[in-house]
Image (cartoon, grey):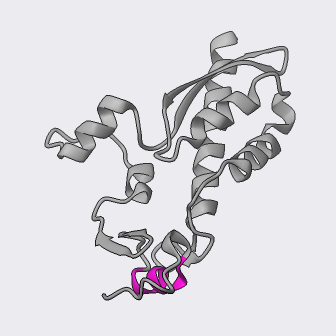
Amino acid sequence: MKINKSICQGIECRLCIKACPTNALYRSYGQLKIYVYTARHALMHTNGSRNQSTIEEFMERYHIGKPEIKVEVKRGFVVGASVIRSAPCGSTWYVAQQIRGREISGIENVVAVAHHSYPCTASMEINPELGDAILHRAGYIIRDAVEKAISESIAEEE
């Protein structure tokens, strides 16, 4: 694929998004490279393979991949939140910060607002492979991680 540098819009370029609907392209102004292992792949990644690639080793070492957090719940409020594994973009840290001190009964909305407020560059275009926007899928994943952490904290308390 050849890029016209005078009209290139970098990561927001709809031509690049359509050329590679799996988002395996690395886009920056005037440049285009194939990036085989994308942030989306890292986000969906689960550990357990004995034959790890260099990228998987990197993800494990720096705790990047499918978000995992630990929370402490007292009297219906999140009193503490820590990140075990962060989404590749770093939004997990922001979400963890935003849920501290919040009531668990409305936590889903807090997570959604925090996730959408984070300066993410994930596309809102419908990804044909997922049938949804990558930003939406990432939102569901962090919401599930928070709900799981709250359930585990409540179970420990009982």
Can residue 48 be seen here?
Answer: no
Q: Residue at x 44, y 71 (%)?
A: 29
Q: Residue at x 67, y 48 (%)?
A: 118
Residue 43 location, x and y as percent? 45, 50
Residue 62 location, x and y as percent? 36, 31
- In this rendering, the answer to whether 147 lies above or below 14 is above
Q: Nearer the viewer, residue 12 or 54?
A: 12
- In this rendering, the answer to whether 156 lies above or below 16 is above
Residue 51 location, x and y as percent? 13, 43
* Left or right of 132 in this view: 108: right
Q: Give the tally of numbered discs.
A: 0
Can residue 33 be seen here?
Answer: yes
Q: Residue at x 51, y 47 (%)?
A: 89
Q: Residue at x 53, y 77 (%)?
A: 9
* Left or right of 36 in this view: 129: right
Magenta residues (range): 13-20
- Quadrant where the C terminus lies? top right
Quarter of image, res 110 = top right
* Left or right of 133 in this view: 39: left
| Residue 146 is one of the magenta-drawn residues | no
Q: Residue furthest left?
A: 51
